[in-house]
Image: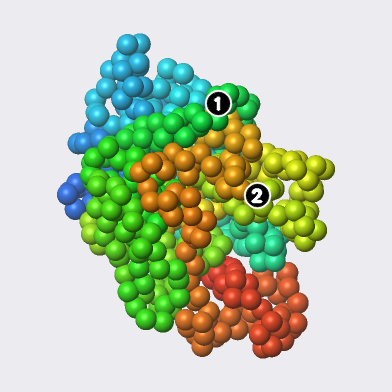
């Protein structure tokens, strides 16, 4: 993957461009590039590292040709997993009229290339970026409906800027728009917009309130910041510098009407085939591709789907006094059952320190939801030390196939469960106690896929992996798997009082029964408040005392009393500290 940034109408200084590159360096350790031109001009300036083998650090001298950046600027920091040689570097500019900066991977770029060559296209590189640009030249904005894989990109097309984000928002795309000044900018991270002075970093009260008190992340185009938006998942944008107008087009990826195979017994076979195809596509890279194996069925399926040997990394505490579930027995069972899985256990217990926790928060421009994200950050750091640059994960299976406990309409039928369902999740109690379908179950799945839970997980995945120069790939989010999942009614996933039945059945002939059908496996969390009670209490107290946004959205005096009495949960303390850190970090990054 890469880091991307661009602006139209801002005329940044060379120091601003240097700050933008520095803010995205961790996303692109293999290179950088800057392209700039005036609107309507046939002349452009492009700058790349003078030594491609040692691209960093980027120095002011390296940017000497950009003493006077022009009206349009595109920038890229590159993690080179697809494409070789100078013709693959970014921003890619075959002509000044059409230039691209791209973050992502197109798993179907070879078939697209062949189709475009039949239509007369000629290519100078083996890069998927060039295929995307050629596809845009051939099909215009409709090219996004042909792309398989995660992406966020922007194309300067003569006198307009077009960009898009993949179906689920696996890759981030933040924007800031000042129509009165006719200035527009985009980036992979909010910090770049702050570092260049294009956004102010003030935390939004409404978003902070929902995060802190309701555990709800920003949805739609909202972010935690007043003047920063995100392009919603699956959407594209079009910016016209002549008028300063920004148009965001809705996602073309409509839901799939339920039309499954009439034989439920076929579900497992269909999913098994789709996962094997998806994983095979995601194992192509200029680097070995490894698997994060948690011991649960989602990632175990991917180990079983591998048609050749695959290195698997799993967490273990490796230290006394560290509180999170030990999954070694589950993982060892998978390794025994799947000969292709070569498992390495990575101990992180001694890494769970206050210092690392603060570094983890520094790497997140928006606050993560819970301690599971911190453990993932530690795992990615350990994996990066092995030299690994690509990992695949089981992300998305729970949201697609109704895998969460609160989605279960048939587990419990008492008044307490119905009350929780109605109050906490906006559902309605089933009218027929024997029914396997909850009235609003489809709406709940759609909301968690596109608005709340999965977008938060994907944002944390991208931030945690890219913080260590690793690309994270998600086989469950391929078109084949997704379209199959969305075709299924809830009753095909809730069977025999079991969640996500097709997922469990897909490789049940290969995996140990307690992995395929077990219900004890849960996400990883660490009891961080108990781990470092004194420094955490100090951080919580400091957050409450100094946070401007907390003073606006909460009764600080009452909160201090509740904290002193021990009436505030560890999860709420987590959000207090994370929110205050987000506010402070954004303020520190804003260009003065």
Of residues 264 and 307, the one drawn nearer to the viewer in this rendering: 264
Q: Which residue is mark 2?
A: 407
Can I make out residue 590 in this image? Answer: no
User: Could you give the CA–CA distance between mark 2 and mark 1, rounded to whole angstroms?
Assistant: 24 Å
Instruction: Classify 400 as above or below 213.
Output: above
> Mark 2 falls on what kind of element?
helix
Counting from the top left corner in percent of width and height, residue 238 is at: 56, 32
Q: Which residue is mark 1?
A: 263
- Label 2 crowd (10 A; few <14 / some 14-19 / many >=20): many
Counting from the top left corner in percent of width and height, residue 485 is at: 54, 35
Residue at the image point whose x is 47% and y is 41% from the top: 505
> Mark 1 falls on what kind of element?
loop
Instruction: Classify 480 as above or below 414.
Output: above
The quarter of the displayed image where residue 40 is located:
top left
Counting from the top left corner in percent of width and height, residue 391 is at: 33, 49
Residue at the image point whose x is 82% and y is 43% from the top: 431
């Amino acid at each position: 993957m890469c880091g991307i940034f661009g602006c139209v109408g801002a005329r940044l200084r060379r120091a601003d461009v240097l700050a933008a590159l520095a803010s995205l360096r961790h996303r692109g350790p293999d290179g950088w590039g800057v392209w700039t031109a005036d609107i309507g001009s046939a002349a452009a300036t492009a700058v790349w590292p003078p030594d491609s083998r040692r691209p960093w650090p980027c120095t002011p001298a390296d940017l000497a040709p950009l003493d006077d950046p022009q009206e349009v600027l595109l920038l890229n920091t590159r993690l080179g997993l697809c494409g070789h040689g100078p013709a693959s570097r970014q921003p890619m500019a075959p002509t000044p009229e059409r230039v691209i900066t791209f973050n992502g991977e197109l798993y179907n770029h070879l078939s697209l290339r062949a189709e475009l060559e039949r239509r007369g296209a000629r290519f100078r590189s083996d890069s998927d970026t060039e295929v995307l640009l050629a596809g845009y030249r051939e099909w215009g904005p409709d090219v996004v409906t042909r792309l398989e894989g995660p992406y966020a990109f922007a194309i300067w097309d003569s006198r307009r800027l077009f960009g898009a984000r993949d179906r689920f928002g696996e890759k981030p795309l933040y924007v800031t728009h000042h129509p009165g000044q006719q200035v527009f900018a985009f980036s992979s991270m909010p910090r770049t917009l702050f570092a260049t002075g294009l956004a102010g970093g003030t935390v939004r009260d409404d978003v902070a309130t929902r995060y802190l008190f309701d555990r709800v992340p920003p949805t739609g185009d909202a972010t935690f910041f007043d003047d920063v938006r995100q392009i919603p998942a699956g959407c594209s944008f079009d910016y016209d510098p002549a008028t300063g107008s920004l148009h965001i087009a809705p996602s073309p990826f409509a839901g799939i009407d339920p039309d499954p195979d009439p034989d439920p017994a076929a579900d497992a076979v269909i999913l098994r085939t789709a996962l094997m195809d998806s994983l095979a596509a995601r194992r192509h890279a200029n680097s070995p591709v490894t698997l994060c194996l948690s011991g649960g069925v989602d990632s175990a399926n991917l180990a079983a789907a591998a048609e050749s040997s695959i290195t698997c990394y799993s967490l273990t505490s490796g230290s006394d006094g560290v509180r999170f579930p030990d999954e070694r027995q589950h993982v060892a069972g998978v390794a025994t059952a799947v000969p292709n899985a070569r498992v390495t256990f990575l101990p992180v217990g001694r890494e769970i320190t206050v210092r690392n926790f603060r570094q983890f928060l520094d790497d997140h421009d928006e606050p993560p939801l819970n301690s599971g994200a911190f453990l993932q950050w530690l795992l990615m750091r350990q994996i990066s030390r092995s030299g690994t640059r690509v990992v695949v994960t089981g992300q998305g299976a729970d949201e697609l196939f109704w895998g969460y406990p609160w989605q279960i309409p048939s587990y419990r039928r008492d008044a307490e469960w119905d009350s929780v369902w109605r109050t906490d999740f906006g559902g309605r109690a089933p009218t027929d106690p024997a029914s396997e379908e909850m009235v609003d179950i489809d709406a709940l799945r759609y909301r968690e896929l596109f608005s709340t839970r999965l977008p938060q997980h994907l944002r944390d995945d991208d931030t945690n992996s890219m913080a260590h120069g690793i690309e994270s790939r998600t086989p469950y989010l391929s078109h084949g798997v997704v379209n199959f999942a969305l075709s299924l009614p809830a009753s095909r996933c809730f069977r025999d009082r079991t969640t996500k039945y097709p997922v469990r059945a897909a490789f049940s002939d290969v995996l140990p029964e307690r992995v395929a059908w077990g219900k004890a496996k849960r996400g990883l969390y660490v009891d961080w408040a108990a781990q470092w009670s004194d420094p955490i209490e100090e951080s919580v107290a400091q957050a409450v005392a100094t946070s401007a946004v907390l003073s606006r959205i909460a009764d600080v005096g009452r909160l201090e009393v509740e904290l002193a009495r021990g009436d505030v949960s560890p999860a709420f303390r987590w959000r207090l500290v994370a929110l205050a850190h987000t506010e402070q970090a954004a303020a520190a990054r804003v260009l003065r």
